[in-house]
Image (cartoon, rainbow, N blue to C red):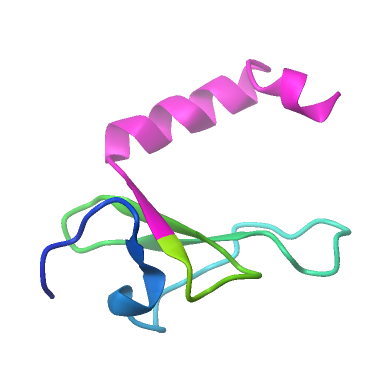
Amino acid sequence: MEHIYNGMPATELGDVGWHKPWSGGNGGNCFETMKLADGRVAVRQSADPDGPALIYTPGEIAAFIRGAKSGQADFLLT
């Protein structure tokens, strides 16, 4: 695998390994995640699988999940 960077075309990461953590009532359009070999996590929009992948460190993903669980992202729902 060549250099993995934030915003790279998601197709360069391959088609195998992408998962939808959950899907709401929006017709299946959501985000998909892939755990990379070095522990980072790639995120892409399922409606645009050829678009950019955002790359997060394990610490960034953990902080986001902890924050969402504690209600810190609830403002996004209103």
Q: Is residue 63 above or below residue 58?
A: above
Answer whether residue 29 is magenta in the image: no
Report the residue at 85% width, 69% height from top: 27
Rendered image quadrant of residue 32: bottom right
SS majority, magenta: helix
Count of marks placed on residues: 0
Rendered image quadrant of residue 29: bottom right
Q: Quadrant of the C terminus?
A: top right
Between 34 and 76, which is closer to the camera in this rendering?
76
Q: Is residue 10 above or below residue 41?
A: below
Q: Is residue 53 above or below residue 74?
A: below
Q: Going by the image, does 60 lie left or right of 20? A: left
Q: Going by the image, does 2 lie left or right of 7? A: left
Q: Is residue 26 above or below residue 47?
A: above
Report the residue at 48% width, 68% height from top: 51
Between 75 and 70, which is closer to the camera in this rendering?
75
Report the residue at 77% width, 69% height from top: 28
Residue 61 x %, y %: 40, 37
Q: Bounds of the magenta span?
A: 53-78
Residue 52 x %, y %: 42, 62
